Amino acid sequence: MSTKVRPTDLEIARLWLAARGLADVTPTPMLAARLAVRRRARLAAAILPAAFLIASALVYVSGLPIRPEDEGFGTQRRWALVVLTALVAGLVLGLWLLDRGVRRVDQRVGAELPRRATHSVRPGWRTVLGVPRAALLVITYAGAAVLAIAALAMRDGAARYAAVILLIGLCGVAVGTAVRLRHVLNHSVVADDEGSLEADFLMRVEDAREVAVPTVVWSLPVVSVFDTGLDPLNTGWLVFIVLSVIALALITTGDARSALAAQRGPSAR
């Protein structure tokens, strides 16, 4: 295989396999290259939303009135929302480009395989993402949308402006998450034997679950509606975020126990 990788990447691939109960699978340059590009993409995918949140906070502050008598939804706020919309588009585009880079590496190493292995039945979203995580993702976005729309309907002035900022940001993050999940669930299998097929499946599962963590949804109220004070609606936001985090922790713990049981099962037999 012509794929060039560093010895460090091969060692990381070996450790990755061992940690997932695949110590008997040989770490190949193909796997090392795929894992390396995913590490870089995940780092960038963590930086992009952080930059988006900072920029959203700056946009929100730029539209606040300097004096109480300036309160209103004027030209400055309209331009701020235009800038925020551009930031949302930039976030979605940036995440799409990151996934495109991962997909291109997968396609390149896949083209070098002497043969292609595949699943007898293609894993669906229930297998890759899992019903609990999918349900949590849908509930989190739906609940956040309901709270944002409620804030938009019940508030006015600066508080209403904060709700608009939140709703636009939420829509952009939802689109970005949907685009990334579609890529993870639909991209082609890159494997040439049973071991690499299992590694490909685990990689797909980890990619999907990484995308499905709604960190930005939990963070958006902090840079918008929480500035208006701890009223009943914002208290509802806090309770909603805490419950979502607890639910994710329980799901993650359950997945870890299931994975550990699956790894011990074959050795016990």
Image (cartoon, rainbow, N blue to C red):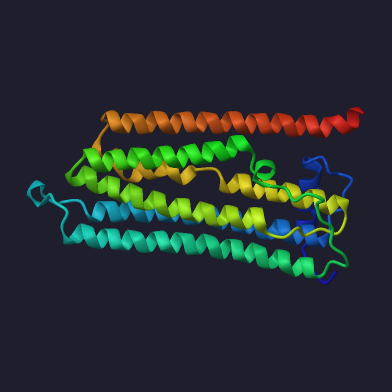
Looking at the image, can residue 4 be seen? no
Above or below for 226 versus 105: above
Picture quadrant of residue 151: top left
Picture quadrant of residue 147: top left
Measuring from the top left, give residue 86's x and y in whole percent. Answer: 36, 64
Task: Please name the residue shown 60% across and 61% down the image.
Answer: 99
Left of 65 or right of it: where is 11? Answer: right
Task: Please name the residue shown 26% across and 43% down the image.
Answer: 152
Task: Please name the residue shown 82% across and 40% down the image.
Answer: 21
Left of 176 or right of it: where is 113? Answer: right
Left of 190 or right of it: where is 209? Answer: left
Measuring from the top left, give residue 35's x and y in whole percent. Answer: 71, 56
Above or below for 211 versus 265: below
User: Quadrant where the C terminus lies?
Assistant: top right
**Residue sitting farthest toward the right:** 269
**Residue sitting farthest toward the front:** 121
Looking at the image, can residue 252 be seen? yes
Please state which of residues 198 and 182 is positioned toward the viewer in this rendering. 182
Measuring from the top left, give residue 208's x and y in whole percent. Answer: 62, 48
User: Quadrant where the N terminus lies?
Assistant: bottom right
Left of 56 or right of it: where is 209? Answer: right
Measuring from the top left, give residue 178's x and y in whole percent. Answer: 53, 53
Please state which of residues 36 and 157 is positioned toward the viewer in this rendering. 157
Task: Please name the residue shown 22% across and 54% down the image.
Answer: 63
Q: How many marks?
A: 0
**Residue sitting farthest toward the left:** 69
Please state which of residues 16 and 115 is positioned toward the viewer in this rendering. 115
Picture quadrant of residue 241: top left
